[in-house]
Amino acid sequence: YSRDDGFEFGRMTDRLMYSEHLSFRSALMEQVLEAFGRNHFAVCVPSLLSVLEGAIAVPWNVTDFHKAGIRNKFLRTKIEDARTESVVQYQWRSVAALVQTVFSGADPSREFPVPKRNLILHGKSDPAKWDHGDCLRLFQAIDTIVSLGNELPSRG
């Protein structure tokens, strides 16, 4: 995303800003992008976690996505419903792997290579340690989820 003067990152953020499936979070995304441009990752990470959760909860009408049983069932169903070995199935597998890692329980005394939702939202993670890579992983996961959301019928 740092090549070509940020062209690819710009394309991704345009998709996120103008996605029908994120319209409920467009003001937040706008502010996150501004904060990201200023390297204010401590603002971006919790906000992107909220957008990530909402990117699934709102278009697919999934409540309590933070609960492991609900999350596991939803993701398993999406993977199983996709055509075997299709790009869509691999996209769901990719999203599931990251989401399961981000949403899984975590010991606050340990360091983790990816942001952990529960530690972050419950004030048990050091915001000074969140970085550019954490944000890019979350942006990419949201972008993939939004692209998968395009299979949903339009909400006219």
Image: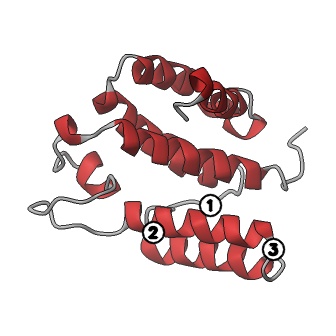
The C terminus - image quarter: top right
Give neighbour class at mark 3: few <14, some 14-19, many 20+ (Cα, 10 Å). Answer: few
Question: Which disc number belongs to residue 2?
Answer: none
41 left or right of 10? Answer: left
Cα separation between marks 2 and 3 = 21 Å
Give neighbour class at mark 1: few <14, some 14-19, many 20+ (Cα, 10 Å). Answer: some
33 left or right of 78? Answer: left
Residue 39 x %, y %: 34, 23
How many numbered marks, from 0 up? Answer: 3
53 left or right of 117? Answer: right
Above or below, comparing residue 73 to residue 105 in the picture: below
Residue at numbered disc 1: 62
Residue 72 x %, y %: 53, 76
Question: 67 or 77, which is in the foreground?
Answer: 77
- Does label 1 or label 2 sit earlier along the sequence? 1
Which quadrant would residue 100 be assigned to in this image?
Answer: bottom left
Q: Amino acid at mark 1?
A: Val
Q: Residue at x 84, y 78 (%)?
A: 83
Can the viewer see residue 58 in this picture?
A: no
Give neighbour class at mark 2: few <14, some 14-19, many 20+ (Cα, 10 Å). Answer: some
Cα separation between marks 1 and 2 = 16 Å
Name the element at disc 1.
Answer: loop
Name the element at disc 2.
Answer: helix
Q: Residue at x 44, y 73 (%)?
A: 68
Above or below, comparing residue 98 to residue 37 in the picture: below
The N terminus - image quarter: top right
Q: Amino acid at mark 2?
A: Gln
Residue at numbered disc 2: 100
Residue at numbered disc 3: 86
Name the element at disc 3.
Answer: loop
Residue 149 x %, y %: 76, 52
